[in-house]
Image: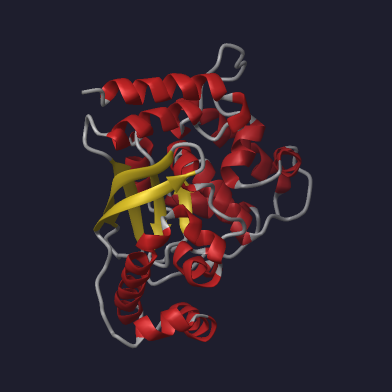
Amino acid sequence: MNLPELAAFLRSRRDLIRPADVGLPVGPRRRVPGLRREEVAQLAGLSADYYTELERGRGAQPSSQTLAALARALRLGGDQRDHLFHLADRPLPASAQGVSARLVQPALLGLLDRLATTPAQVITDLHETLVQNELAAALLGRAPQPRGPATGFAYRWFTDPAARAVYPPEDHPHHSRVFVADLHAVAARRSRDSEVAAMTAALRRRSAEFATLWDTHKVGLRRTDHKRIVHPTLGVIELDCHSLFSEDGRQRLLWFTAPPGTEGAAQLGLLGVIGTQDMAATDQRLAEGNRLISTTHRP
């Protein structure tokens, strides 16, 4: 492993990314044009101390998962991503297209960067969140770490009751049916993929609901859906969820919208104010936002 070259490469890529490119505020006290080390660490799901050691040419050899996370955080293209793996002396991630399914495809990442005013995220076909903007994190919560099929939302939906809190209880049967129909379509397309077979087998063992729905053999990729999302502060937000599929179908860009003038649109505007801050520190702005919502819908 070439630690000095790896450190220099990470620094050079960090300097090229502007905070606005990844949805971060510039702020009056910023002394560097690019990202700070702690910001890269946050985007990659790493500790600031660990990332700082990498940039100093020290520390343990980063894992393939860590390198993939850094490639996403630093917006690396295919050649740059491969270079990062070579410097760390790790094998390149392989798939049918020669690119790991968990490295965000550049076209989807480019579109995500332009969706700064609406919640948006890129997921795999197994509903594993790869990258999300700040509004998506504020709406849905941050993606679990470390990543993997078992942390995907569809898997957690049937194995972790807490995952269902994001939707009202009366909507749960609908989402269960949609998840299973979607996974049926994915499993057929990836019929020779052991990852999908292992996931569906595990779900059949762990969830009687999943097993029953799976045996109905209903198939249908989720392309659009109307959702009611439960936010801990704003309450139930009614939104439309849209999907854009990558060419190979392995990744999807999801984004959420609400018609102008609706309560959902006003709540999305307030979500941008609240963000992922400590809710206890935003009482005044919440009151102002609630006044805005009531004024918007006053007869």
- In the orientation shown, which residue stands out farthest toward the front? 299
Residue placed at 49% from the left, 64% from the top? 152
Residue 204 percent coordinates (x, y): 47, 84
Residue placed at 26% from the left, 61% from the top? 247
Comparing 297 with 114, the one in front is 297
Comparing 158 with 250, the one in front is 158
Q: Is residue 179 toward the left or the right of residue 261 in the image?
A: right
Residue placed at 49% from the left, 39% from the top? 138
Comparing 181 with 123, the one in front is 181
Residue 194 in view here: no
- In the orientation shown, which residue stands out farthest toward the right? 59
Above or below residue 289? Residue 118 is: below
Q: Is residue 108 toward the left or the right of residue 271 in the image?
A: left
The quadrant in which residue 159 appears is: bottom right
Residue 36 in view here: yes
Comparing 110 with 98, the one in front is 110
Image quarter of the N terminus: bottom right
Residue placed at 65% from the left, 54% from the top? 88
Report how many numbered discs are placed on residues in the image. Answer: 0
Residue 262 percent coordinates (x, y): 25, 34
Residue 90 percent coordinates (x, y): 62, 62
